[in-house]
Amino acid sequence: MTTATNTMKKFNLPCLDSRKSFYGRAQVTEYANGEKVLTSYNTEVCKITPAGEFVRLWDGESATTIRHINSFLSFYGLPGGGLAWWRNLEVKKQ
């Protein structure tokens, strides 16, 4: 779980690929300190730090969660994405 406090807003991540929606299964929480956390199927999978660093929080993977991560990256204009890229990231536990 993230340690950031003072939630600014929580919203459903827009689906930025060819599909219509993530149906509420991917949510973003933006904190007052600038941290942005992606929750996929009730699991915090990654975040963007206030400094703009992408951090992998979850050691798992699934096709759907990779789609969520790709949309999260696109939504915030960050490079990266895809299964091979995800597998090469170090998992940083909170």
Image: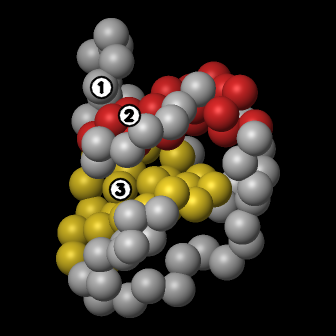
Apparent side of residue 5 relative to residue 60 in the rendered image (left or right) = left
Q: Is residue 78 visible?
A: yes
Question: In the image as oriented, which residue stretches furthest toward the left?
Answer: 8
Q: Quadrant for the C terminus, please.
A: bottom right
How far across and down, in percent of the image, does residue 87 sit?
75, 37
- Residue occupied by mark 1: 16
Give, as a three-letter code, the residue at label 1: Leu
Gap between marks 2 and 3 measured at Cα:
11 Å
Gap between marks 1 and 3 measured at Cα:
14 Å
Give, as a three-letter code, the residue at label 3: Val
Disc 1 on helix, strand or loop? loop
Badge number at residue 71 = 2
- Residue occupied by mark 3: 28
Disc 3 on helix, strand or loop? strand
How far across and down, in percent of the image, does residue 32 sit?
25, 83
Mark 1 vs mark 2: which is more N-terminal?
1
Residue in the image at 75% along x and 41% along y: 88
Residue in the image at 63% along x and 56% along y: 56
How far across and down, in percent of the image, does residue 8 sit?
21, 76
